Image (tube, rainbow, N blue to C red):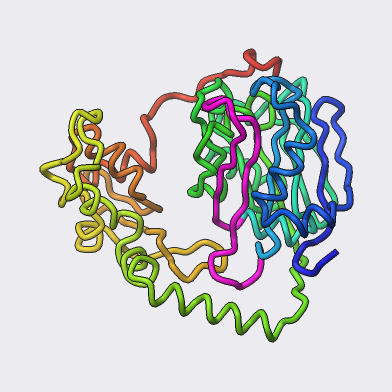
Amino acid sequence: MNKAWQGKLLRVDLAAGTCNVEALNEEWANNYIGGRGLGSKYFTEEVSPEVEPMSPENKLIMATGPLTGTYGAANGRYMVITKSPLTGTIACSNSGGYFPSELKYAGFDMIIFEGKSEHPVYLQVRDGKAELVGAVHLWGMSSNDTEEAILSEFHGDAKVACIGPAGEIGVHFACVINDKHRAAGRSGVGMVMGSKNLKAVAVRGTGGVQVADPKAYREAALDSYGVLKENPVTGEGLPALGTAVLVNVMNQNGGLPTRNAQSGTFDKAEDISGEALVAGELRRVKSCMGCIISCGRVTKITDPRYAGEGEGPEYETLWALGAACGISDMPAILQRIRHGPHLPRFDNRLCHGAV
């Protein structure tokens, strides 16, 4: 097996409750590029195109790429691949953060989930070993609360990918959330995860990732940093303003969803823009593993109505909770991002045979 790949995948049979380590298909890894290519190859070889997205026969794959976990530019990412309940076609939803690299450090390039658990479970992975444990006590929790609970009972330094109530009850665009603030957010992959009664994956790894020629790789990585630095988007716009740089850009081009998409322009877009965030609530920038772009934002609300510090916002949350609702109150938007709609926790366990 070529360097950078760990050469192992973890196959989890949720119905049987088993976790088995397999050798990664070296020919496929060489012929299909990255986590998306390799994961899609496994999926199409193992799953019928006629499979129903919510069927136990549908599989869900979490796949890293060969450079995940290395210091090359923007390589700390993974893919969630499955049959999409939203589109009815193959889904490949991408996310960053720290969970993807941790999976590589734990010794695996990929996890393949198949079948459906009788009761809610979550997967614990630590340095080449894995087991499924009960998650009835986590069912109904938000993704943030789920991560906190898992870290308290499994490993405080673990990285967690999980679903919240949306994935449990079958919302077609439900996400898989990792590291609390990163989302595999397209195609409804969280709904498939919930249909399998899989609440979360918690990973802790202390290994590393080897490359074949460290000196040549370092030179290539430095070159890639230079390309990103020289680009006006990745070198200036995103580092300075985060993805919120798009608010004014989209508004000027008539593409900012406003008042439930009745309009493409918002007369108060300036108030919820990346520029407004820098002038007000921004406290520091944040990056995913190994990424020099640092488009993440850490903000602090000083408005006494909502005082507090947390991560966000992204462009998507600014238009969805701001322009699309006709709201230009930045502190109110930040408060809603962090605390949600303040609904009480509900018990959805009966829906999936948890009790």
271 vs 62, nearest the viewer:
62
**Direction from residue 194 to residue 327 in the image, left or right:** left
Considering depth in this image, is 323 or 253 the residue closer to the camera? 253
Magenta stretch, overall SS: loop
Q: Split into 4 quadrants, where in the image is the C terminus?
A: top right
Which residue lies at the image location 46% right of the left edge and 79% below the top edge? Answer: 226
Q: Position of residue 347 (x, y in %)?
A: 56, 19
Residue 12 position, x and y percent, is 81, 37
Taking the magenta stretch, the answer to whether it contains residue 303 is no
Q: Which residues, given as a range, are shown in magenta? A: 69-98
Q: How many marks?
A: 0
Question: Left or right: 22 with respect to 226?
Answer: right
Question: Where does residue 298 sit, x and y in percent of width and height?
Answer: 38, 59
Residue 209 appears left or right of 93: right
Any part of residue 286 in sight = yes
Q: Measuring 59% from the left and 36% from the top, which residue is drawn there?
A: 91
Q: Is residue 208 visible?
A: no
Residue extending farthest to the front is: 31
The residue located at (19%, 28%) in the rendering is 262
Position of the N terminus, as image quadrant, is: bottom right
Q: Residue furthest left?
A: 267
For this rendering, which residue is in front, 286 or 9? 9
Is 254 positioned to the left or the right of 85 in the image? left
Residue 85 part of the magenta-drawn span = yes
Q: Quadrant of residue 131?
A: top right
Residue at 86% x, 40% y is 19
